[in-house]
């Protein structure tokens, strides 16, 4: 069991450390991290989302109970931690980024190899559903809120202008195009699909390297905020997802897989957003780092519980 957890985590840790050392040794600097963040958020990650959503079979997107339960578990966590962040900071950027860190598990980069070992290739469906909710709702919502928070001036005109700017960003329209292609059964031309996949496959390595680079340029503080974020992500999030699945009577392997996905540490993408927004950087990067380290213990326990459920079934 330990091998199943440590195996996927070691490459993640290696790439993060590589980026950290590059920053500390002056090979890359803070300006480079901003450039890489823009590369991830505006080019390679949207390509991954568009290609992944377009390749998702329409029939899988129509499993409404599972999709709704996933939505409740993911966006419920987002809404809860946003409220906590707003109560603590009374500032839109910090509240949004706290919600993003606590509500977005590292399903794409860590979930796929772990679940494939446990459940086989069919487990990719759970990852796609989670990323569907994240890419169509959480990421665009976070983009919109951060854009609004960064807008100059006040009033309805400034708000509409900020929303218009957010909608034009690739992270807003790329996944929407992909899901529209899936629902209409439109297949991307092979050359276009291969090109998007080629670009999108760079997302895990580049984002992890950038996370390490960001860590090298900010002061990592083990504050109460970080410990609260870690507890919310590793303990409350899988419990909340389990409650949503029970509420909608969703059972079986997909339900078990979704609980495990929510027990994963925070994804690296929120750190890219924090870096680009110039807010909540230390809290976001430290929370991601600590949740990744502690997940070796908490995720092993989650697997133990799920394995017990599989054995009893």
Image (cartoon, grey):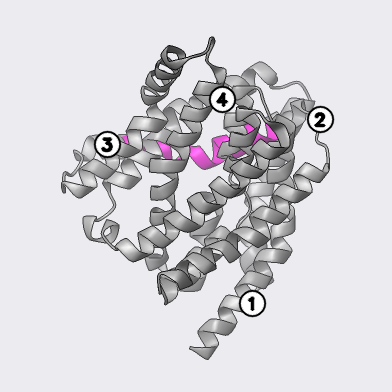
Which residue is located at x 56 percent, y 52 percent?
A: 77
User: Label 4, label 1: how many angstroms apart (C-alpha)?
Assistant: 38 Å
The first of marks 3 and 4 along the sequence is: 4
> Residue 85: image x %, image y %?
66, 39
User: Label 3, label 2: how many angstroms apart (C-alpha)?
Assistant: 39 Å
Quarter holding residue 191:
top left
> Which region of the structure is painted magenta?
196-213
Which residue is located at x 41 percent, y 49 percent?
A: 133
The crowding category of the residue bearing disc 2, from other C-alpha atoms within 10 Å (few below 14, some 14 to 19, many at least 20), is: few
Q: Nearer the viewer, mark 2 or mark 4?
A: 2
On residue 304, the disc is 1
Q: Nearer the viewer, mark 3 or mark 4?
A: 3
User: Label 3, label 4: how many angstroms apart (C-alpha)?
Assistant: 24 Å
User: Label 1, label 2: how many angstroms apart (C-alpha)?
Assistant: 35 Å
The residue that mark 4 highlights is: 36
On residue 163, the disc is none
The residue that mark 3 highlights is: 177
The residue that mark 2 highlights is: 219
> Residue 212: image x %, image y %?
69, 35
């Amino acid at each position: 069991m330990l091998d199943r957890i440590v195996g996927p985590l070691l490459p993640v840790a290696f790439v993060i450390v590589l980026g950290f050392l590059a920053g500390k040794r002056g090979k890359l600097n803070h300006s480079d991290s901003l450039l890489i963040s823009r590369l991830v958020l505006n080019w390679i990650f949207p390509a991954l989302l568009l290609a992944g959503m377009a390749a998702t079979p329409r029939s899988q997107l129509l499993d409404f109970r599972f999709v709704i339960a996933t939505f409740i578990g993911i966006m419920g966590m987002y809404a809860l931690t946003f409220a906590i962040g707003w109560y603590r900071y009374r500032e839109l950027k910090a509240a949004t980024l706290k919600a993003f860190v606590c509500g977005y598990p590292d399903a794409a980069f860590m979930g796929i190899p772990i679940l494939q070992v446990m459940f086989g290739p069919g487990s990719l469906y759970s990852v796609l559903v989670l990323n569907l909710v994240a890419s169509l709702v959480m990421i665009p919502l976070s983009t919109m809120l951060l854009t609004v928070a960064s807008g100059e001036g006040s009033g309805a005109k400034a708000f509409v202008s900020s929303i218009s700017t957010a909608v034009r960003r690739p992270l807003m329209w790329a996944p929407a195009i992909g899901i529209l292609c899936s629902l209409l059964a439109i297949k991307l031309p092979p050359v276009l699909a291969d090109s998007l996949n080629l670009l999108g496959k760079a997302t895990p390595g580049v984002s992890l390297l950038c996370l390490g680079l960001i860590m090298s340029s900010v002061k990592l503080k083990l504050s109460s905020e970080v410990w609260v974020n870690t507890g919310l992500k590793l303990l409350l999030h899988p419990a909340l997802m389990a409650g949503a699945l029970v509420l909608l009577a969703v059972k079986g392997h997909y339900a078990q897989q979704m609980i495990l996905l929510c027990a994963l540490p925070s994804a690296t993408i929120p750190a890219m957003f924090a870096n680009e927004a110039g807010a909540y950087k230390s809290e976001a990067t430290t929370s991601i780092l600590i949740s990744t380290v502690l997940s070796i213990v908490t995720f092993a326990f989650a697997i133990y519980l799920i394995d017990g459920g599989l054995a009893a079934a």
